[in-house]
Amino acid sequence: MWIYEKKLQYPVNIKHPNAAMAKLIISQYGGPDGESAASVRYLSQRFATPYHEIRAILTDIGTEELAHMEIIGAMVYQLTKGLSPEEIKDQGFDAYFVDHTNGVYLAAASGAPFTAAYVGVKGDVIADLNEDMAAEQKARVTYDNLLRFADDPDVIDPLRFLREREIVHYQRFGEGLRRTTEHLDEKNYYAFNPDYDGVSKAYARG
């Protein structure tokens, strides 16, 4: 299904470790609106999608989210690499360090571990695409918030790249939703509505 190119989608070369920033950025690795949840969400939704074009969008974006996980993981690792115990404690990373050293663990900035409850899959193409558009906007807001705390260009640049990709994904899901609702037929969720032959067909005709 995939061809893996052994380099990051966007380079990460952080020269100044900052565990306090890593503690925030990790939310986009394993938090409620992070890249892990996005990837699993889209790559799971694709199976029940009745349209090849929408399935392709979900597959493309779900795959790209895996690449974004890799970027975030590299950032977290580089931001915590080589710090002394004193620096780790002073920067508020000591509780995480005790449990995970500087391994990259699926967790939110709050410390809450990743849960499948973050992953919305309804098996209904219109419901799922609306979920996906909201998810991309929530991820964009999270990147906005992270950028408010970042002052290192080596951190800011990849965060800006990832934020821009959330906007592009939102637009692509929006296009998919428009195509789906413009061609309502027995493949979409109205087919499962008991009023499909009446109210829903009238709605579909406009």
Image (tube, rainbow, N blue to C red):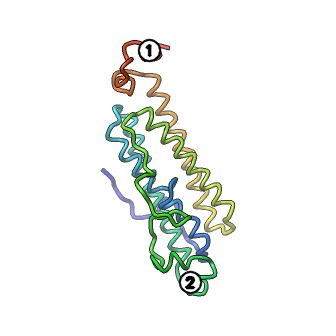
Q: Residue at x 65, y 57 (%)?
A: 145
Image x and y of residue 155, in percent? 61, 66
Image x and y of residue 57, in percent? 42, 40
Residue 15 visible somewhere in the drawing: no
Q: Which residue is mark 2?
A: 83
Q: Residue at x 60, y 55 (%)?
A: 142
Residue 158 visible somewhere in the drawing: yes
Judging depth in this view, the residue of 200 and 57 nearest the camera is 200
Image x and y of residue 148, in percent? 69, 60
Q: Element under label 1? A: helix
Rounded to the nearest angstrom, the CA distance separating label 2 from label 1 is: 64 Å
Q: Quadrant of residue 16?
A: bottom right
Question: Against 50, is 94 above or below?
Answer: below
Q: Residue at x 39, y 64 (%)?
A: 6
Q: Which residue is mark 1?
A: 199
Q: Residue at x 57, y 69 (%)?
A: 23
* Classed neighbour count for the residue bearing mark 2: other residues with Cα under 10 Å, few (<14), some (14–19), many (≥20): some
Instruction: Determine contact: label 2, label 1, CB under 8 Å.
Output: no
Image x and y of residue 35, in percent? 48, 55
Question: Against 57, is 153 above or below?
Answer: below
Q: Element under label 2? A: loop
Q: Which amino acid, by three-letter code, is at mark 2? A: Leu
Mark 2 or mark 1: which comes first in sequence?
A: 2
Q: Nearer the viewer, mark 2 or mark 1?
A: 1
